[in-house]
Image (cartoon, grey):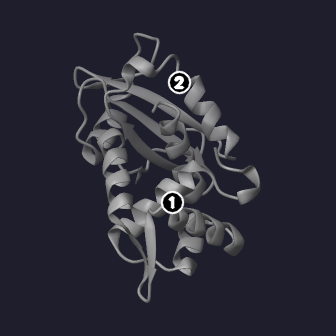
Amino acid sequence: MIDKRAGYNEAHIIQALFLISQRPVGRMNLMGELKLGEASVKTLLKNLKDNGMIISTRRGHELTSKGKAFLTRILKMLEKPKEIDISDYTVSKENYAIVVKKASNKVKMGVEQRDEAIKVGADGATTFIFKSGKLWFPGTNEKANENLTEKVSKLFELKDGDVVIIGSAKNKYKAREAAIMAALSLL
């Protein structure tokens, strides 16, 4: 469990690891991408270092073999979140979609994922289950709009049993954080 005084949450950790895995990243870049203050990013990086996930180099922070292994395990369960333009279907203008692989049996009505998004300050999250080539609202026999299914299917290679969560917020950083936190509730 993360100490609330740290100023960051589990979604920030996952986002930081995604960013660091792409290239060495400095503290200032992380502050900008995560929309966290310097003290929070310093604490996050210190904790990642203390847990053997990253090392600091002159080029920036890099993943260690332990960090790479952890991220590989995460990516077996989650797809990286992707920005998606679907504000006609959601509660806010900025939206990020994320896929939780083979997790449909863990979804009740999607309210739990929405609540996780709201806890981090987002406007909400919408949960879908992918089945028979369509997105379905959980706990119902209602299909999502065909246009929405098409847009999501262009971003991800979906398989039956996958869960798609769309985090919605007034800014893209909070929408991404919301999508990740909602997805983590299914792991």
Q: Would you identify the image quadrant in which residue 157 lies?
A: top left
Q: Where is residue 186 in the image (x, y as percent from the top left)?
A: 47, 30
**Is residue 144 shown above or below 166?**
above
Residue 97 location (% of width, % of height): 42, 44
Asked if one can make out residue 99 in the rendered structure from this viewpoint, the answer is yes
Q: Is residue 48 above or below residue 88?
A: below
Q: Earlier in the sequence, mark 2 or mark 1?
A: 1
Q: Foreground: 50 or 61?
A: 50
What amino acid type is highlighted by mark number 2? Gly
In the image: residue 104, left or right of residue 15 = left
- Foreground mark, 2 or 1, reads 1
Quadrant where the N terminus is found in the figure:
top right
User: Tag 1, which secondary structure?
Assistant: loop
Mark 2 element type: loop
**Label 1 crowd bin: few (<14), some (14–19), many (20+), radius 10 Å:** few
Furthest residue toward right = 5
Give the numbered dot on residue 51: 1
Q: Quadrant of the C terminus?
A: top left
Q: Which residue is drawn at 30% across and 51% down?
A: 72
Q: Is residue 131 left or right of residue 112?
A: left
Amino acid type of the residue that numbered disc 1 sits on in the rendered structure? Asn
**Residue closest to the eye, 11 or 164:** 11
Q: Mark 2 points at which residue?
A: 110
Is disc 2 surrounded by few (<14), some (14 to 19) or many (20+) residues within 10 Å?
many
* Point 68% across, 75% down: residue: 38
110 or 53: which is nearer to us? Answer: 53
Which residue occupies 31% across, 27% down?
102
Residue 161 image point, x, y percent: 30, 23
Q: Position of residue 73 (x, y in %)?
A: 33, 45
